[in-house]
Amino acid sequence: MYEINKVPKDLLLKQGDDMIFPKRRYKMRDFNNIVKRIDSFQDEMIDMQIKLCSIPAIAPTSGGEGEAKKADFLLDVLKNIGFDKIDVIKAPDMDAPSNYRPNILARYKGKNSSRTIWVMTHMDIVPPGELSLWNGDPFKAWVKEGKVFGRGTEDNQQDMVASIFALKAFDEEGIAPQYDIGIALVADEETGSEKGIDYVLAQSDAFRQQDLIIVPDAGNEDGTMIEVAEKSLLWLKFETLGKQAHGSTPEKGINSFRAASFLVTELNKLYKLFPEKDPLFEPPISTFEPTKKEPNVPNVNTIPGEDIFYLDSRILPKYTVEEVEEKIQKMSQKIEKKFKVKITIEEEQKAPAAPPTPADAAVVQALKKAIKAVYKKEGQAVGIGGGTVAALFRNANFEAACWAKVDETAHQPNEYCIVDNMLGDSKVFAHVFLQE
Ligand SMILES: [Zn+2]
């Protein structure tokens, strides 16, 4: 124990600090030094965001080349930080010009190798969408009022850069993290993860049960949301077949669009059929939303014989996906009968909810402490509507938490990352890396 009057000034605890480091007070100095170091990286971090934006890693199924070039750039960055081991796991993909989708696992030795603290982000991005909605080139990132704008800046580069620079700070300060640190940069998150973390989990034994797995790919504006559970996901495609006819003689055809519209209205009853609430989730209910609509006929004066629309359902874990599908089948049969159409339902995506990570899991507690230290806020474990890759870890029986401080501009035009969030999240990771 230090005698208080002999402790150098920078080691003196401010009020509340002893809550953060109850046992080893000198760590406060390490943390302060790392915080300062991270702040000094600000321009470098922005610069890296801009470079990452200029290498769009869009999945081949979304019309892009995949992540190979972005991965090569990132490997160069990682090689300049003292990682002990960098593995690249290549998932074959004949549709990518490189013929593979790269997944990077970089390991940094800590004082204790009994567990690894992982931060996993994804390299791929979604296409920019309608370019006229952007105030600039989505692949030439620009900085304005403390924000970096460009496709991928928030999803998922903000925390990719944050995690890499957190380790760089340890490296340059010569401070060893408490446990081994793993930085995972994966492919194919936006289109299902089959060639991303799914492939890595099947090919590699890098992840261990006792590891802490942080996936900064979901969050909220004040950085208090720690996502631990998800709803089941069900995406259905409805194809309604009627009979095409001239607009002046509708009696000679069967209007598939009208039938499909009645089906859309019918499907709204799912909200009443599955009304349960669970306060862990935001929103607390199951949702059933008609979304995508494919064009039917190109001209106004034709009765459409074919109509296609999609339904996006997010189902609370207390219901099974099957019981929802059963009700949907019945509704569709009712419409088929009433309108004399043929409706086929195809599963576009079906992901039953993974077992939740307990709200008191080690990874949740570590994040709570770090959020408190950096952002002065109380983190809270919550469930969300599904679709984060953490579910893949949970299905493989790992505890994983999604967390980031984000403005939720992902997938939108003028996507941006708040520079302070990038720095703050980096400090949160650093805090977790220091914790015992
Ligand atoms: Zn993402």
Image: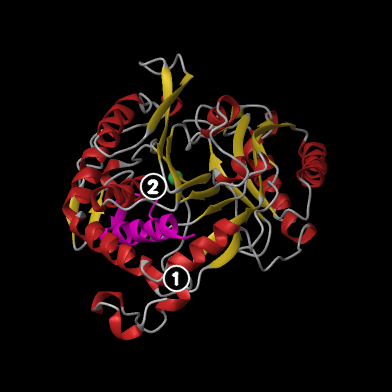
* Relative depth, front residue between 75 and 271: 75
Coordinates of residue 391 in the picture (x, y in percent): 61, 45
60 in relation to 301, above or below: above
Query: Taking 359 as reference, is 300 left or right?
Result: left
Q: In which of the image's four quarters is ligand 1 placed?
A: top left
Q: Kindly tell me whether mark 2's CB lies below 8 Å from ligand 1.
A: yes
Coordinates of residue 404 in the picture (x, y in percent): 43, 57
61 in relation to 360, above or below: above
Residue ID at (70%, 65%): 278
Coordinates of residue 388 in the picture (x, y in percent): 54, 46
Q: Which mark is residue 155?
A: 2
Q: Is residue 384 visible?
A: no
Q: Which residue is disc 1 drawn over?
A: 21
Q: Kindly tell me whether mark 1's CB lies below 8 Å from ligand 1.
A: no
| Residue 313 covered by magenta stretch | no
Q: Is residue 10 visible?
A: yes
Coordinates of residue 295 in the picture (x, y in percent): 51, 34
Query: Looking at the picture, which amino acid does disc 1 mark?
Result: Phe
**What separation in Å lies between label 1 and label 2 (alpha carbons)?**
32 Å
| Residue 418 covered by magenta stretch | yes
* Relative depth, front residue between 334 and 32: 32
Circle 2 SS class: helix
Query: Taking 293 as reference, is 242 left or right?
Result: right
Circle 1 SS class: loop
Q: Which residues are magenta?
A: 409-436
* Relative depth, front residue between 255 and 433: 433
Circle 2 residues within 10 Å: few <14, some 14–19, many ≥20: many
Circle count: 2
371 in relation to 251, above or below: below
